[in-house]
Amino acid sequence: MVAFPNAKINLGLYITEKRSDGYHNLESVFVPVGWSDVLEILPASETSFRSTGLPIPGETSTNLCLRAYEQLRKDFDLPPVRIHLHKVVPIGAGLGGGSSDAAFTLKVLNTLFDLKLSTEALEAYARPLGSDCAFFIRNEAKFCVGKGDEFSEIMLNLAGKSILLVYPDLHSSTAEAYAGIRPRPAQAQWTQVLQQPLHTWQASITNDFEQSLFPKYPQLAQIKRQLYEAGAAYASMSGSGSTVYGIFEGEVPEALFPQLTTWQGKL
Ligand SMILES: C[C@](O)(CO)[C@H](O)COP(=O)(O)OP(=O)(O)OC[C@H]1O[C@@H](n2ccc(N)nc2=O)[C@H](O)[C@@H]1O
Ligand SMILES: Nc1ncnc2c1ncn2[C@@H]1O[C@H](COP(=O)(O)OP(=O)(O)OP(=O)(O)O)[C@@H](O)[C@H]1O
């Protein structure tokens, strides 16, 4: 069975509190985007994992796809599987790529072996695999709080708008990015803001990680500026970086950022 684990972006991101477990509480709107890996899982005589495409740092045995398989195997007598991941979404880019691979592995195994797990049960298996992981079970735009793994409905209408994601080939560690932040209460009136025209959002929502990363990596602020100059109605860094995106009311202008890795599509 083949699936296409996609990326996410964050619309606004506030780090509101340091928790006693070392994590941080946040407030953000998570939105799925179409930039995707390719994941194939087949029953096999023994369990194996291989990846092609972008190189994934770390041991194969720690890959999130295998960890997701092991998570389910604690409770189900799963047959061995052959997993092939073709990695396309940049790693450590604020796009949740690894978390998406893990969530889609759970969903594929649920279908392939008819485990009959509900959406809520799949989310519970996803949570220990990464803070972003549970989001990709439903994979729908949501308002997120807690570690980024508690969701509620949000009214959001971005259908038909275009997005350009720009990855400046700069790896930013999520843990380091969180360590550079001083938590503060969220500044956004979410429900009001998201009903306003897109071009007004820049005055009303921000990503707290920009404050700590932009001074360190001026290239990120420059990409955001260039996106606005190119006509983006809203531009921001996603997650803990380093991907910066621009949302356009019409088509994305041609030939932007020819030297960098980019992806464009519709929301
Ligand atoms: C920045 C975001 O992408 C926003 O959606 C996520 O919060 C990142 O989630 P993730 O990559 O799935 O992160 P995890 O693998 O769970 O955590 C990596 C590290 O980031 C820090 N971390 C992560 C999430 C969170 N809410 N608070 C944290 O402080 C912790 O030091 C943790 O050890
Ligand atoms: N399937 C996978 N894809 C990407 N990274 C993986 C995967 N499995 C394990 N990893 C490990 O996770 C690390 C990347 O995690 P990280 O959370 O920084 O990135 P991400 O999930 O791609 O995106 P984000 O920056 O949004 O969290 C890599 O260094 C790699 O060792």
Image: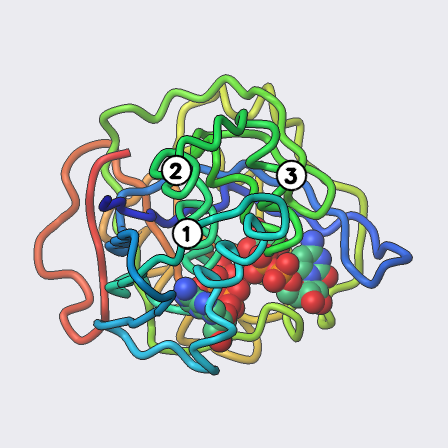
Q: x, y (%) of residue 181?
A: 73, 65
Q: Which element carries disc 2, helix, strand or loop? A: loop
Viewer-side label of 3, 1: 1
- Crowdedness near tag 2: few (<14), some (14–19) or many (≥20) residues, C-alpha within 10 Å: few
Residue shown at the point (63%, 52%) measured from the top left: 74
Left-right relation of 176 to 157: right
Q: Are marks 3 and 1 in contact (CB under 8 Å)?
A: no
Of the pair 49 and 180, the residue shown nearer to us: 49
Q: Is the residue 153 above or below the residue 221 in the image? A: above
Q: Is residue 50 left or right of residue 138?
A: left
> Which amino acid type is shown beneath numbered disc 3?
Ala
Query: Which x, y percent locates residue 40?
Result: 25, 53
Task: Say the numbered circle drawn on residue 113.
Answer: 2
Q: Looking at this rendering, what residue extends furthest in the right direction? A: 20
Q: Which mark is residue 254?
A: none
Which residue type does callout 2 highlight? Phe
Can you say whether 28 is above or below 55 in the image? above
Disc 3 beta carbon < 8 A from ligand 1?
no
Q: Is residue 199 left or right of residue 201?
A: left
Q: Label 2, label 3: how many angstroms apart (C-alpha)?
A: 18 Å
N-terminal-most mark, 2 or 3: 2
Question: Is residue 153 among what the camera can see?
Answer: yes
* Residue indicated by mark 1: 79
Q: Residue at x 60, y 56 (%)?
A: 130
Which residue is the site of mark 3? 124
Q: CA distance from mark 2 to mark 1?
A: 9 Å
Tag 2 near tag 1, CB within 8 Å: yes
Query: Where is ligand 1, by quadrant?
Result: bottom right
